Amino acid sequence: MNDNSTPPQHKLRFSIFYHFLPGIVILLFYVITKPLIVSLGFQPSFGILAGFLFAGIPIQFIIMFKEGYKVNGRFSLSNIIYYKKPILIWQYVVLAIIFIIYAMFVSTILSRFNSILLEDLFSWLPDWFKNNSQPFLSTTPIIVVVVSFAVLFLVDGIINPIVEEVYFRGFLMPRISRFGVWTPIVSAVLFSLVHFWQPWNAVQIFLLVLPVYYVVWYKQNFYISVVVHCLANLLGATFALSQFLGG
């Protein structure tokens, strides 16, 4: 990996392409495999998790290793990942607490707004797509529930957030650093739009990640976003599990 503070820059059209490509393949995987996922007894949303694992993550690694081969002459992530300046441990803790509290506040405030967008602007989407977070039915086999939550915690809570932050913040964001103070905004806009399987949440995602990306940019440390992303997703998975158990 690279600690150089002046990474090579992508043309904006290439950066947009590299941002959108993982989201496109995840969306295609989600839509194409939906009949199979449902036939196996899983909720359609399980296809998104599978899409992360079998489509989005591989595409991100292919792009990064391709760049690594060009830079290093071998398939490696050395010298292509930036924003790794160290900060003190207590700063990670404080920043994580602040951002999680902020995320809870924003999510609560915008919950109704997201519902309005879903009901009005995206009413044309099929019900299974709009309800991709629908709770399990009482008749859902316990093995399906256990596998679903295990994959949710492992993939959405740990693996995918880590890979996404390495890719989007450690690899792509430094390559648009020429935009200066606008860099976090460009990164946040592109990342929020990448979530094609939940477009009604784009505004919320943008507002949630923007402060984090400003700290990442200012501190030149993408590990901050790794910690916050993993923690936020793990808390979301825990909340989903508590809702299911309570129901």
Image: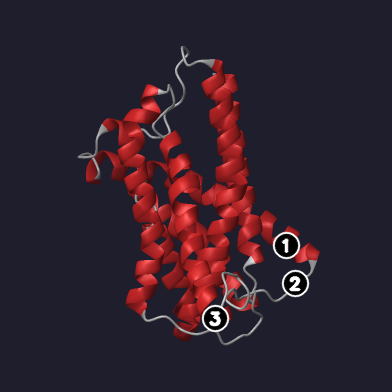
Contact (CB < 8 A) between labels 2 and 1?
A: yes
Residue type beneath disc 1: Tyr
Please state the horizontal and vertical placement of residue 34, each as a whole percent of the image: 34, 33
Tell whether 115 sits left or right of 98: left
Circle 3: element type: helix
How far apart, in angstroms, are the residues tagged by discs 3 and 2? 27 Å
Query: Of circles 1 and 3, which is in front?
Result: 3
The residue sitting at the top extreme is 139
**In the rendered image of this protein, does residue 41 appear above or below residue 3?**
above
Tell whether 55 sits left or right of 32: right
Using the rendered image of the protein, determine whether residue 91 is visible from the camera's viewpoint: yes
How far apart, in angstroms, are the residues tagged by discs 1 and 3? 31 Å
Circle 1: element type: helix
Q: Which residue is mark 1?
A: 92
Please state the horizontal and vertical placement of residue 59, each as a whole percent of the image: 44, 58
Please identify the quarter of the rendering in which residue 46 is found. Answer: top left
Q: Which residue is mark 3?
A: 71
Circle 2: element type: loop
